[in-house]
Image: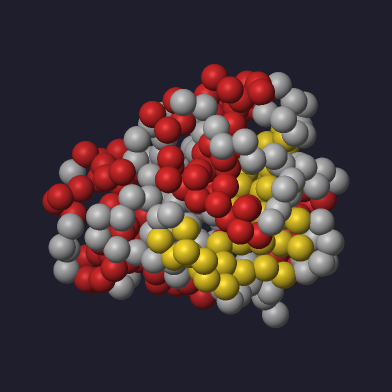
Amino acid sequence: MSEWRLTEEYQTSAGKVAAGRAGQGPALVVAHGWPWSSFSWHRVIPQLSRKYTVYWYDMPGYGQSEKRGGQRTSLDVQGAVFSEMLAHWQLEKPSVMAHDFGGATTLRAHLLHGCDYERYVLMNVVAMRPWGSDFFDHVGKHVDAFQGLPPHIHRAIVEAYIRGALISEISDADFQELAAPWLTDAGSQSFYQQFAQADEKYTAEIEPLFGAIRCPVQVVWGEDDPWIPLARGEALHRLIGQDRLEIMQGVGHLPQLEAPERVLEAVSGFL
């Protein structure tokens, strides 16, 4: 049975977040991205929790955390919230495993907010310009046109967007769980707010600092990522300047759901 549960609630500066933890041992925090939630880690948490105390939360505006009109959930906010969550959990130097926007979130927490990490895995992360897919760019330019769509049209957009990240099949139950938080009224509003608040300045601020990361880093990348090409991961690896790059063949943007056993194998010798 999955160890993933959201049994905790904490009031951050950006709203209430739902959180959870499992296991015993050194601290390991997993950070999800867009448009996902901490559920995206549920297939690797059971194995990781045999060796670590694994911590997770849904970012403000995502998953089961607070969503409200006018809520600021951009990457500057998320970096600050990650710092708040480490303080809340009293974690001074956890290991961190980040995916997608979780990369920029945790990089900002480390490079701008002074959070220290023991070990650091960056997997198919948003960290460098340019961001995302063609659809991401299009919606960002025309957010108002997407607000207030009929529910069945909105569902089709969310589901098509999620499918666009995948190369390998995932279970239907996993797929539906990824989509579900965005299909409520509050979720629909929050879904498009994320596009409206996306701004590449939040990664531009940290790109010059990658060589100053203060811990061992492993970059892991699904080779066939349709959203963030491998070349971006290789460039990130070079800028960080550490000799740890794991390329996963036949995997898209969601390695932890597309190939969870391979992810665990890739990080087991590093974490």
**Quarter residue 25 falls in:** bottom right
Q: Is residue 177 above or below residue 200?
A: below
Image vertical order of residue 262 relative to residue 3, above or below:
above
**Residue at horizontal 38 percent and vertical 40 percent from the top:** 133
Which of the 4 quarters of the picture holds residue 138? top left
Q: Position of residue 108 (x, y in %)?
A: 54, 36
Left or right of 122: which side holds 17? Answer: left
Horizontal side, residue 142 vs residue 176: left or right: left
Quarter of image, res 200: top left
Q: Position of residue 194 (x, y in %)?
A: 33, 50
At 72% from the left and 48% from the top, the residue drawn is 92
Question: Which image quarter holds the N terminus?
Answer: bottom right
Give coordinates of residue 131: x percent, y percent.
Answer: 41, 35
Residue at image location 64% in from the left, 40% down from the top = 115
Q: Residue furthest bottom?
A: 1
Q: How many marks?
A: 0
Identify the residue shown where x is 71% and y is 62%: 54
Q: Do we see residue 230 in this rendering?
A: no
Q: Position of residue 23 (x, y in %)?
A: 78, 69
| Residue in the foreground of this view, choosing between 38 and 164 | 38
Left or right: where does residue 107 sit relative to residue 43?
A: left
**Observer able to see residue 208:** yes
Residue 269 versus residue 238 in the image, above or below = below
* Structure colour scheme: secondary structure
For this view, does 23 lie left or right of residue 99? right
Name the residue nearer the viewer: 118 or 112.
112
Q: Nearer the viewer, residue 80 or 224?
A: 80
